[in-house]
Image (spheres, rainbow, N blue to C red):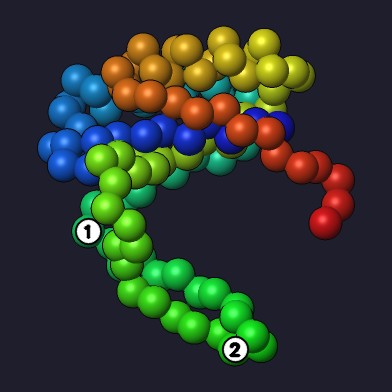
Amino acid sequence: MKILALYKPAHQNPPTPEMMAKMNAFIDELTKAGKLIATEGRKAGGLEVKIRMSKGQLSVTDGPFTEANEHIGGFTVIAARDLDEALSWARKLAAATTLPVEVRPVREGGH
């Protein structure tokens, strides 16, 4: 499995209808290929919370946490045989959204 993390500029406007149509076509293609495991977009203006354990104490901090010029706009988890297949899907996602896509492996089969 791989995660395709979609990055967007921090101050970018919401996706256009054209971008959403391309994204939906990408998701349809993944689904038909039997590769889609999960996909979600980040909710704009949603509450961000960080929970951290330090010296035996939990702390809860409301975000945002750092100044950044981009953030994760959403993710898609895919069933990919290998990195080459994941990169092929990532290229399609980047072409559909015109946004950077990061490919990350997922540890499978245990904790």
Horizontal side of residue 109 vs 21, given as left or right: right
Residue 22 seen from this side: no
Which residue appears farthest toward the bottom when viewing the image? 57
The picture places residue 42, in percent across and down from the top left corner, at 35, 48
Q: Is residue 76 above or below residue 61?
A: above
Distance CA(mark 2)–CA(mark 1): 28 Å
Q: Is residue 106 above or below residue 83?
A: below
The picture places residue 77, in percent across and down from the top left corner, at 58, 36
Mark 1: few/some/many CA within 10 Å (<14, 14-19, 20+): few
Image label count: 2
Instruction: Give the residue number, with chain letter if any, for mark 2.
Output: 57
Horizontal side of residue 110 vs 32, given as left or right: right
Is mark 2 in CB contact (under 8 Å) with mark 1?
Answer: no
Horizontal side of residue 55 vs 4, given as left or right: right
Q: Residue at x 83, y 56 (%)?
A: 111
The kind of residue on which mark 2 rests is Gln
Nearer-N-terminus badge (2/1): 1
Q: Is residue 37 above or below residue 32?
A: below
Q: Residue at x 64, y 85 (%)?
A: 55
Mark 2: few/some/many CA within 10 Å (<14, 14-19, 20+): few
The kind of residue on which mark 1 rests is Gly
Q: Residue at x 17, y 37 (%)?
A: 12
The answer to which of 108 and 8 lies nearer the viewer is 8
Q: Is residue 102 above or below residue 50?
A: above
Quadrant that contains the N terminus: top right
Q: Which mark is residue 23?
A: none
The picture places residue 62, in percent across and down from the top left corner, at 34, 74
Q: Secondary structure at mark 2?
A: strand
Instruction: Give the residue number, with chain letter if any, for mark 1.
Output: 45
Q: Disc 2 vs disc 1: which is toward the camera?
A: 2
Q: Secondary structure at mark 1?
A: loop
